Amino acid sequence: MTETASTEENSLLVEPAGKFRIYLGAAAGVGKTVAMLDEGLRRLNRGTDVVIGFMESHDRPFTRTKAEGLEVVPRKTVNYKGRQFEELDLDGIIKRRPEVVLVDELAHSNVPGSGRNAKRWQDVLEILDAGISVITTVNIQHLESLADAVETMTGAKVKERVPDWVVRRADQIELVDSSPEQLRRRLLHGNIYPLEKVSTALTHFFRHENLAALRELSLRFMADETEEEMIQYLGRLDSQGQWETTERIMVAVTGISGSDQILHRAARIAARVRSEFKVVHVVRDEGASRSMEQNLESLKEVAANLGAQWVDLRGEDIAETLVRYAREERITQIVIGSTLRGRWAEMVSGSIHKRLMRAAAKYGIDIHIIARREPILEYIAPDDGENSK
C-alpha cells in the first residue's frame, strides 16, 4: 500500500510539457508579433492565464497598442560592455507560472552573462519543460538548414539561427503571410524600420526578388510540415501502410573551411525526399591540423542541429572507404563539396571525386557535388532587433 501511494504521489509531481506554437514569417514586418498578441488576447478573453514574457514592438505604435491588456513579466536588465540591455527573465516566468507565455523572436541570442542559456530558444525549451505553453515567432531565414541558402540568395549575413529540430518540435506552426509588394509599402511608410534605414533595406534585403524567394521558402516549408503531420496522424491511427523513405542520404565532409554549406545543402536534399541523413568523415593515419580539428568540432555541432548522425570512418583510401560504407548502409545519394586542390596535385595523386564517382556508379549510388562559396561578410540585414548587439 505504501509503495502504491508513493508512486501515485510521484506521478502528480511530474509536470506535462507545455504546448508550443510558432508564428512563422518570410521577413520582418509580415505581422508575426501582432498575430502572437492577437492569439494571446483571444485566450485571455477565454479565461486563460496569459502573460507577455518578451515582446519587441520596435517602436511601432500599432504593436504597442495590441499589447495593452496583457500582463507583462518584467524583463531582466543586464550590463554588457558599458551598455544596458533587457532580456527575458526565464526564472521570473517559471516562478510566475502562467498557463501561456508570449515570447517574441525565437532566434534571438541572449546578452552574455544574462542567464544560463546563450539562446532564447533554449529558454523557451526550459519554459515548455516546466509545463508552461509558449507562443513565439521566427523568420524563415533563421532555420539552420536554410540560413546559408538565404545568405547566398540575399547577400545578407544571417547571424541568428535556430536548429530545425526545435521548430519541428512545435505542436502548431502558422504562417503569417504577406506579399512582397505589401511588405515594401509597409517599409516605405516606416512601419517596419526607422526611416533612416528604409533606403538601405529596400536596395538590399527587401528587394522584391528576395522577398518573393523568402515567401516561396516559407510556403514550401509549411507544405512539408503539413505532410509530416498527415504521416504522424496516420501513424497514430495505426495505419498498416509502409511509410518508409526509400532514399538514404550521406554527406562526406572534411575539415576544410566552408564545409558547413555542404551540410546545409544536404539537409535540404534530405528534407525534399523525406530522408534522414548521415554525415561521414574519413579519418586518416596522418592526422589533422589543429585548425582542421576545430572546423570538425564546429561541423559536428551543425550536424547535430540539423538532426544528422555523425560517423567517423578510418581508411587511407577515402573514395573506397566512403563507397564501402555507403553500400553497407544502403545509401542511395552521396553529397560532397567541390575540390579545392590544384590541377597539378590531382594529376599526381588522382582526383578523389573522379574515383568516388566511378566507384559509386558501379552500385547505382548518385553523387551530388556542391560548389563551395565565399562567406558573406559585406552586409548584415536588420531583422526584428535580433542583430542589435
Image: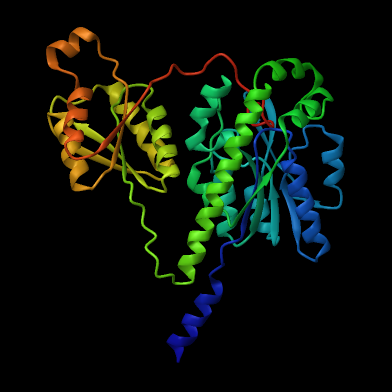
Location of residue 28 in the rendering, given as x and y in whole percent from the top left corner: 70, 33
Q: Nearer the viewer, residue 13 or 270?
A: 270
Q: Quadrant of the C terminus?
A: top right
Identity of the residue drawn at 65% across and 18% down: 204
Q: Residue furthest top?
A: 344
Location of residue 3 in the rendering, given as x and y in whole percent from the top left corner: 43, 86
Does residue 262 appear left or right of residue 131 in this picture? Answer: left
Q: Is 318 located above or below residue 50 in the figure?
A: above
Location of residue 322 in the rendering, given as x and y in whole percent from the top left corner: 20, 35
Q: Quadrant of the N terminus?
A: bottom left
Does residue 241 appear left or right of residue 125 in this picture? Answer: left
Q: Is 6 located above or below residue 262 in the figure?
A: below
The image quadrant of residue 286 is top left
Q: Nearer the viewer, residue 240 or 202?
A: 240
Location of residue 46 in the rendering, given as x and y in whole percent from the top left corner: 81, 65
Identity of the residue drawn at 80% across and 58% down: 42
Does residue 58 appear left or right of residue 4 in this picture? Answer: right
